[in-house]
Image: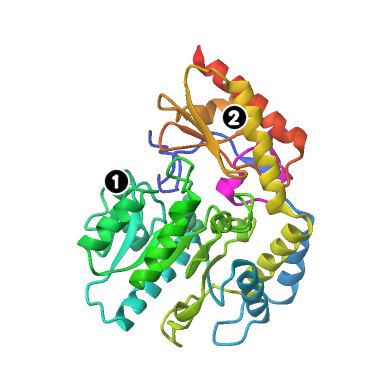
Amino acid sequence: MTDTSSHLMQAYARQPVAFVRGSGASLWDADGVEYLDAMAGVAVTSLGHAHPDIAAAIAEQAGLLLHTSNLFRIDWQERLGERLCALAGMERAFFCNSGAEANEAALKLARLHARRARVAQPQVLVMDNGFHGRTLATLAATGNPAAQRGFEPLMPGFVRVPYDDIGAVRRAAAEAPDIVAVLVETVQGEGGVRAAGAAYLRELRALCDRHGWLLMADEVQTGMGRTGAWFGYRHAGVVPDVVTLAKGLGNGFPIGACLARGPAAALFSPGGHGSTFGGNPLACRVGCAVIDVMAREQLPQRAAVLGRRLLAALRAALHGHPDVLAIRGQGLMIGIELDHPCAGLVGRALEQQRLLITVTRGNTLRLLPPLICSEAQIDDIAARVARLLDIDQT
Ligand code: PMP
């Protein structure tokens, strides 16, 4: 369907609703109709809409200084780098404006790491159903042929294996000696809300150590408290060499970060990589304000508690539902896999339940509510999803 009246490129299939205002987990359209947000802009607005601390940080910084240049020291960038590294077990940060850009920085670190190791044709190990972005390099890393279609030739330098299968990684190591890094999501968000096992991540860490590969965790969707810990790898007790962040780091303000420790933290040299907007004072101040609120309100822990509550409520409400194959998740990242394509559910959820949800991999209803939801709102999400799926049966 092409909307011929629009001057926007048709890159998105959009719902016919526009929101004009938000507060917490609520959104309103121009007619004053209230909606319940169970997707948080795809794991972005974790603190909810119009959070007063974030609004105040933006307003104050906008009145002081928006932008200078990475030619100068930027104090808010130093501060955010220090705070993120302390939380993530990393040593240095590079700031950019999106998840894809953060992964581009990580992939460039892998190339520099290969050069240092004198590997001429370096390969990065990536996963089936992984998602890393839509720029040409991150699209090649992404394990979704539908997203790649039409954009060939894809950038070379990737070896793809099944997710959460350590045997496949061992076989790849034996067959492809030029692997220099692994890029992995701790929970595949776009890939159907699938969590890697803790044992898998630990064995992956051990294989990286044995072969001298960089372990690069794409925490763009899972990071900043979403899974019930500040970062998804914390559940497994492993520490990657490189971590990428975006989405929840800015609560809606565009920002991305690539963090690294050890030798990987020292690979970029002046002039070697850069971004005009990346790390500007406003974005970094927002990042610091997000961390302040998350730490004060213990939102990673709250995501764990609310996630368990939502999973239990969904399992109780949908028990025995003939279309439901699985209900799974980690923290407030929950998928309900159905036995049929369910793209139409997004529109029906809006229209009939005034509920914002997303669908991934065609048949998995995904819930990513703000971490500041009340218990009552979490129960309300479960009730609306149950009503939605009952209606869908008819
Ligand atoms: N990595 C992961 C795991 C993601 O889920 C996404 C976005 N869905 C990206 C990268 C890309 O982020 P962005 O859209 O900010 O480029």
- For residue 320, which quarter of the picture? top right
Kind of residue at disc 1: Pro
Residue at horizontal 33 percent and vertical 83 percent from the top: 116
- Farthest top residue in view: 394
Residue under circle 1? 145
- For residue 308, which quarter of the picture? top right
Give the total of numbered labels: 2
Dot 1 beta carbon under 8 Å from ligand 1: no
Up-down: is 101 above or below 280? above
Residue at horizontal 53 percent and vertical 18 percent from the top: 321
Image quarter of the N terminus: top left
**Residue 307 location in percent, x, y?**
65, 40
Residue at horizontal 71 percent and vertical 41 percent from the top: 25
| Horizontal side of residue 238 vs 34, given as left or right | left
Q: Which residues are magenta?
A: 21-46
**Residue 195 location in percent, x, y?**
49, 46
- Would residue 40 be counted in the magenta stretch? yes
- Would residue 60 be counted in the magenta stretch? no
Spatial separation of the CA atoms under disc 2 and disc 1: 29 Å
Foreground residue among 188 and 198: 198
Badge 2 marks a residue whose secondary structure is: helix
Up-down: is 381 above or below 146? above
Mark number displayed over residue 350: 2
Foreground residue among 99 and 117: 117
Foreground residue among 282 and 258: 258
Q: Is residue 47 visible?
A: no
Badge 1 marks a residue whose secondary structure is: helix
**Residue 145 location in percent, x, y?**
29, 46
| Horizontal side of residue 248 vs 345, given as left or right | right
Question: Badge 2 local density, few (<14 within 10 Å), some, or many (20+)?
Answer: some
Question: Badge 1 local density, few (<14 within 10 Å), some, or many (20+)?
Answer: few
